[in-house]
Amino acid sequence: MTDFILQAMLVMLMLFAVGTLLRLLLGPTASDRLVALNVLSAVSLALLVLWGIKVGRALYLDVALVYDIFGFLGFLAITRFLKDRKEN
């Protein structure tokens, strides 16, 4: 039963990732694309954590933690770039 729930969650997160990727590519404004990138980062983080639980390896959890830190720093950098660009 637990394996079925994990598999269903992985499939749902993959569908969310595809939808978010479409918004990232087709978003009408830079703000839409930035939010889609942040959501895609969160979905991929959740996928890494669930995959680590499914296969029983803690390495995926470590990778997810590092990925989350770099994703947040990247989000801050892009936000600052867009803010500076909007002021000019």
Image (cartoon, helix red, strand yellow):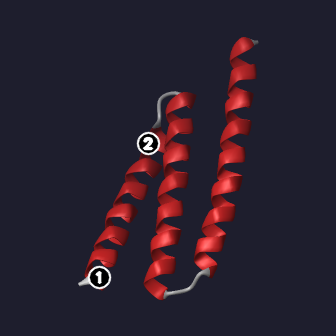
The structure residue drawn at horizontal position 47% and vertical position 57%, both measured from the top left corner, is: 43
How far apart in space, not on screen, are marks 1 and 2 (Cα)? 32 Å
Which percent across, then down, holds residue 8? 28, 72
Residue at 43% from the left image edge and 49% from the top image edge: 20
Nearest the viewer among 30 and 53 is: 53
Where in the figure is residue 73, as x and y percent of width and height?
A: 72, 46
In the displayed structure image, the side of residue 16 where residue 49 appears, left or right = right
N-terminal of the pair, mark 1 or mark 2, is: 1
Q: Which residue is mark 2?
A: 23
Q: Residues within 10 Å of mark 2 (few under 14, many from 20)?
A: some
Question: Is residue 72 placed above or below 8 in the rendered structure?
Answer: above
Q: Number of marks in the image? A: 2
Q: Is residue 11 left or right of residue 78?
A: left
Q: Is residue 22 above or below residue 51?
A: above
Amino acid type of the residue that numbered disc 2 sits on in the rendered structure: Arg
Position above or below: 56 against 44: below
Name the residue at 50% across, 87% down. 56
Crowd around label 1: few <14 · some 14–19 · many ≥20 (10 Å): few
Percent coordinates x, y for residue 22 in the rendering: 43, 47
Q: Which residue is mark 1?
A: 2
| Snapshot quadrant of residue 86 | top right
At 47% from the left edge and 63% from the top edge, which residue is drawn?
Answer: 46
Of tags 1 and 2, the one toward the viewer is: 1
Q: Give the numbered dot on residue 77.
A: none
> In the rendered image, which quarter is residue 88 located in?
top right
